[in-house]
Amino acid sequence: MAPSRSQTSLFSLLAVTALLPSPVWAFDCKDVMADRQHFDLSKLAGPHVVHWKEEDPAHDMRYKYNFTLDICDKLKWHKGGSLATECHHGARVCGLREDINLAVDRNATITPIDIAGTFTSLSGRVIDAKFELLRNPKSNSDSGREGVRAFLNGGRHPFTKDGLNQRAIIEFVCDKEKTGLEGDEKDDGEREDGDKDDGDDDKKEEKLRRRDDAGKGKCEDTENSLRFCGYQQEDEGKDKKVQTLRLEWKTKYACEDAPSVDGGSHWGFFGWFFIILFLAIATYLIFGSWLNYNRYGARGWDLLPHGDAIRDIPYIAKDFARKVAGTVQGGGSRGGYAAV
Ligand SMILES: *[C@@H]1O[C@H](CO)[C@@H](O)[C@H](O)[C@H]1NC(C)=O
Ligand SMILES: *[C@@H]1O[C@H](CO)[C@@H](O)[C@H](O)[C@H]1NC(C)=O
């Protein structure tokens, strides 16, 4: 029967819209939720790079890391890229490690490391993004800091079944003075703010090595908004290790009273309100028609619930308009007419 078929499609439409809020294999950087707090991080979109150098004097090795992340989208490959120098498709956080053998030839080999993302080619590995407030009572060490901590999973290195799990933990820290793009390095290696000691590699190296000595839990000593804070194996439950990239990102968009980036979030509520209102009216009309059709064998206008009333709407409206117009006219020219 025709009406029941449209009903079915209506209900499947309702079911689909109910499922829309972000599934675990992706998340919307415009609408990050942590303990019922909403954050819009869309201004931090695009690939951003942080660096790290690690020395292993015992083996005459030096490791240079470039970590690239895009919190709003999958990372795109560079022109002419291949899996030799790029992460797998679906990565949102990617590490490129350059191994330099200081003793032998100083030739570098490059290893891409998938840290976080949703990888369809590695079954079951999804980003499974989780967010919590920095002032979460569970971790009392953070008391006094405002912002949101993101847990991004899904990575593994090597990219095989028995590789080491990888993840990224990014702390977005509220800083009203910072947009989050200060000292930003775009993916092509260009600095947004001119950084004077860019060419001074030795000086930088010294600074980095000193930071390493300073111990764990300390972030890179720089004025940049986005800072490297560590890349180490951490315990993940029983007997399980996960190599964790820790970053800190100072930005005003992590403040809980941050002004909305665009008016869009409010439209969201009204948009949903009207969709639901429309669906409710449609359901009522379809279901009512179906009832009238079945019970009373109604046809044409009589199918619609309150068919008479709906049919009369144009006349009622015209009548109402005429009355209003009459009142306004009458009021405006009262003095001109004598009462009869
Ligand atoms: C290192 O690089 C040089 C030239 O850049 C090349 O001749 C040599 O074969 C390389 N060594 C190895 C071990 O790849
Ligand atoms: C890492 O970044 C630096 C600076 O942008 C660049 O010179 C270097 O080639 C990059 N390393 C890799 C392995 O891509």
Image (spheres, rainbow, N blue to C red):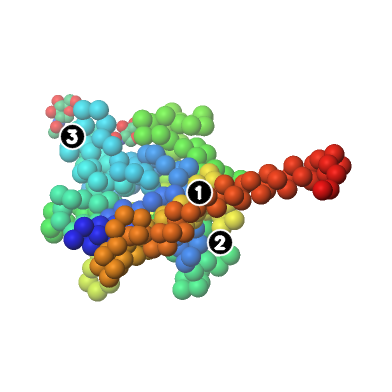
Q: Nearer the viewer, residue 168 or 70?
A: 70
**Location of the N terminus (image quadrant):** bottom left
| Amino acid type of the residue that numbered disc 2 sits on in the rendered structure | Arg
State which image quarter holds ligand 2: top left
Q: Earlier in the sequence, mark 1 or mark 3?
A: 3
Answer whether residue 251 is visible to the viewer in this image.
Answer: no
| Amino acid type of the residue that numbered disc 1 sits on in the rendered structure | Pro
Q: CA distance from mark 1 to mark 2?
A: 61 Å
| Amino acid type of the residue that numbered disc 3 sits on in the rendered structure | Ser
- Front: mark 1 or 2: 1
Q: Secondary structure at mark 1?
A: helix
Q: Which residue is mark 2?
A: 145
Q: Residue at x 42, y 29 (%)?
A: 190
The image quarter in which residue 99 lies? top left
* Residue 239 screen position, x and y as percent: 22, 72
Contact check, label 2 and label 3, Cβ < 8 Å: no
Q: Which residue is mark 1?
A: 314
Q: Which mark is residue 82?
A: 3
Q: Earlier in the sequence, mark 1 or mark 2?
A: 2
